[in-house]
Amino acid sequence: MVCLLVATKADPASIGPASALLSLCSSWTRGPDIDNNPSYRTRDVRMIHLQDKIVYEDFLEQRWETVTGENVSEIIFMSRHTAASNRPALTVHPIGIPHLEHDANSPAGGKPGRASPPNSRIGAWFRLLKSTAANNNLLPEFEVTLEATHHGPWTEVPAMFVEIGSTEDYWRREDAAATVASVFMKGLGLDGDQAVGCWSEEIHAGEKVLLGIGGGHYAPRHTDIAQKDGVWVGHLLSGYSLLMSDPGANVKDYDKIEGTWKEAILEAVSATKRAFPGGEVVAHLDAIVTLKFIFWVVSGLLRLLELHCMCATGLFSSHHPSHHRTLTNSNDEVLCAHQVHEIRRGFLPIWLPVCIC
């Protein structure tokens, strides 16, 4: 089994770290061409340099296996990151578009309605990326963060993206490329030490794996949890991936909350379980919503997780002044039957649900 690294010459934030990694490790040798794309090999790591956009390069593991006969255990992509803020950033994220309907068009690759298994290294490499960036004096200029699950390509083996953002000046920064290359060097064990973030069912069975649900694209509250040593990170579904219709008068009927939110969550759960065999997937809910919608959003999420025997923890906040031990709306109707603990953060009441199964 080999780990496949993927870079593209069309992206300076991709080929830059890839070239730096080739320079860091002297044991690389030239491998076979894959669809006329050059490849490189060292130990159990392989690297391919593509010509075009990565997000449309589906089934890379199968294409590699067809040419080389080697089975691919995981794929890690090097890529640029774009953001409206143009803020310099180093990011890590899983891939997939589980919130889209299966017959929808995908503007950024991937298979609509599906999520590839998240690479088990996401949490550990996020922490490694942050510490390496600090050692290389990229902080606080660069923000180091997780991103929610998004875009393609489609792969059936665990995958993740490591990105440099957010403008061309930063994509071409040699110190950023060197930082990412150092993370790959250490994270893959190419420096002679033990590799970082490898999941073993024999060793890690029963350990908890975070499945993030809700929040913004940069998953700040899920990221807070992921910063702790030993936290495994699966898929991260942002609020915009939870497409729900207001059930109106049917607010208490879970099945009346339409949209692709249920399918997206169940696909993310399934993919995360495949990536962490023997692990306990725990949903971390970031439901920062207005009181108008908190009842049906939160109760719908909890009901879905309860039906599928998952545990849930998370933060629910609102401007409601009540100090009830259960979540209530403005009419003091109980939002969910599960016992909750209330804690305080500033002037906002925040509730932390107990395990629901």
Image: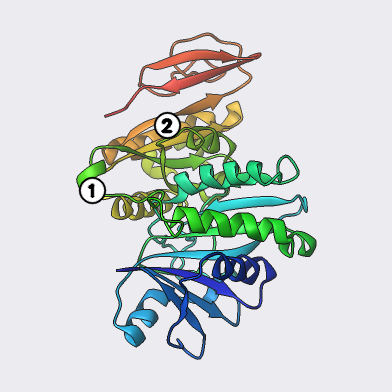
Q: Quadrant of the N terminus?
A: bottom left
- Residue 295 location (% of width, % of height): 49, 29
Q: Gap in Å between the C-alphas at discs 1 and 2?
A: 33 Å
Q: Read off the residue under disc 1.
A: 201
Residue 245 in view, yes or no = no
| Other-residue count near label 2 (Cα within 10 Å), few / some / many at <14 / 14–19 / ≥20 | many
Q: Quadrant of the C terminus?
A: top left
Q: Is 316 situated above or below 306?
A: above
**What colour scheme governs how the chains and residues are painted in the rendered image of this protein?**
rainbow
Instruction: Give residue 135's quadrant in the image.
Output: top right
Q: Is residue 120 left or right of residue 349?
A: left
- Residue 186 location (% of width, % of height): 48, 53
* Residue at horizontal 56 percent and vertical 72 percent from the top: 7
Question: SS of the residue at dot 2?
Answer: helix
Q: Read off the residue under disc 2.
A: 299
Foreground of the two, 146 or 22: 22
Residue 150 in view, yes or no = yes
Q: Looking at the picture, which amino acid does disc 2 mark? A: Ser
Q: Is residue 227 left or right of residue 264?
A: right
* Residue at horizontal 57 percent and vertical 60 percent from the top: 181
* Residue at horizontal 66 percent and vertical 65 percent from the top: 13
| Other-residue count near label 1 (Cα within 10 Å), few / some / many at <14 / 14–19 / ≥20 | few
Q: Is 254 situated above or below 356?
A: below
